[in-house]
Amino acid sequence: MSRILILYGTTDGHTRKVAEAVAKAFREEGCNTEVREARVSGPSVAPEPFEAVVVAASIHASGFQRPVKQWVRAHAAELNRRPSAFLAVCLGILEPKAEARQQVWTIIDRFVDGAGWKPDVRLPIAGALPYSRYGWFKKWIIRRIVAKAGGDTDTSRDYEYTDWQALAEFVHHFVTEHGLVARPMTV
């Protein structure tokens, strides 16, 4: 059975939900998964025991979580020896303006290329607006940013934009393309 590491970084919790959904989809494809948060266990986990690695992080202030960046830089050479994917969780990919979507790709490419990592897949994933988790100042700032983009500004509720079906399809294609299927045990 293929072993898959899913390492993630999260700020408001949604990327954890994405990582867990990806792990579930891999299990449904017959793979064994291990989900780790970079901030908690990243330094102690290495990619070597795994046949493939998926890294998920969310964009905040034009960058990704520091523990994820540190882990990828430390393990880039080993990541390049196995199938790997990078999932960038963000709302910018929903922007109707091409310039905003291009900025998301620029942030992704700057991080991945700067780390010396060459993942097989670079995929932006629409995230969430968890207004209920924000303090008043962050809620005010985020609401202003979202309003400029024409997004949801009712701060009395949370919004989730992730396309869960597309995420499951990504996993299926990744497993198929890299032959990461359940393998019969040899005796």
Image: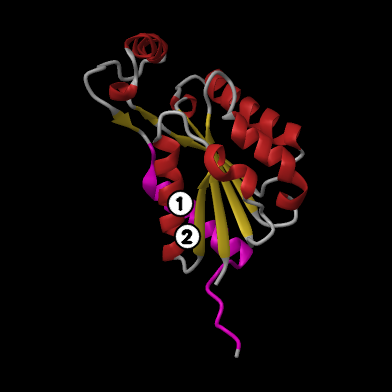
For the residue marked with disc 2, what is the amino acid? Answer: Phe
Instruction: Answer with left or right where residue 77 lies relative to residue 54.
Output: right
Magenta stretch in the rendered image: 162-186
Q: Within 10 angstroms of label 2, few (less than 14), some, or many (20 or more) residues?
A: many
| Disc 1 to disc 2: CB gap under 8 Å | yes
For the residue marked with disc 1, what is the amino acid? Answer: Val
Above or below, comparing residue 30 to residue 6 in the picture = below
Instruction: Answer with left or right where residue 80 lies relative to residue 87.
Output: right
In percent of the image, x 50 and y 60: which residue is there?
Answer: 33
Viewport quadrant of the C terminus: bottom right
When asked about the image quadrant of residue 158, the answer is top left
Q: CA distance from mark 1 to mark 2?
A: 6 Å
Q: Which residue is mark 1?
A: 22
Label number found at residue 26 = 2
Above or below, comparing residue 187 to residue 54 in the picture = below
Prevailing secondary structure of the magenta residues: helix
Residue 90 picture location, percent across and down? 48, 29
Instruction: Answer with left or right where residue 27 lies relative to residue 118.
Output: left
Viewport quadrant of the N terminus: bottom right
Label number found at residue 89 = none
When asked about the image quadrant of residue 105, the answer is top right
In percent of the image, x 77 and y 39: which residue is there?
Answer: 116
Residue 77 picture location, percent across and down? 78, 48
In percent of the image, x 61 and y 53: which residue is there?
Answer: 53
The total number of labels drawn is 2
Residue 79 picture location, percent across and down? 71, 50
In percent of the image, x 45 and y 23: which residue is there?
Answer: 95
Residue 167 picture location, percent across and down? 44, 48
**Which residue occupies the extreme left position in the image?**
156
Q: Is residue 66 magenta?
A: no
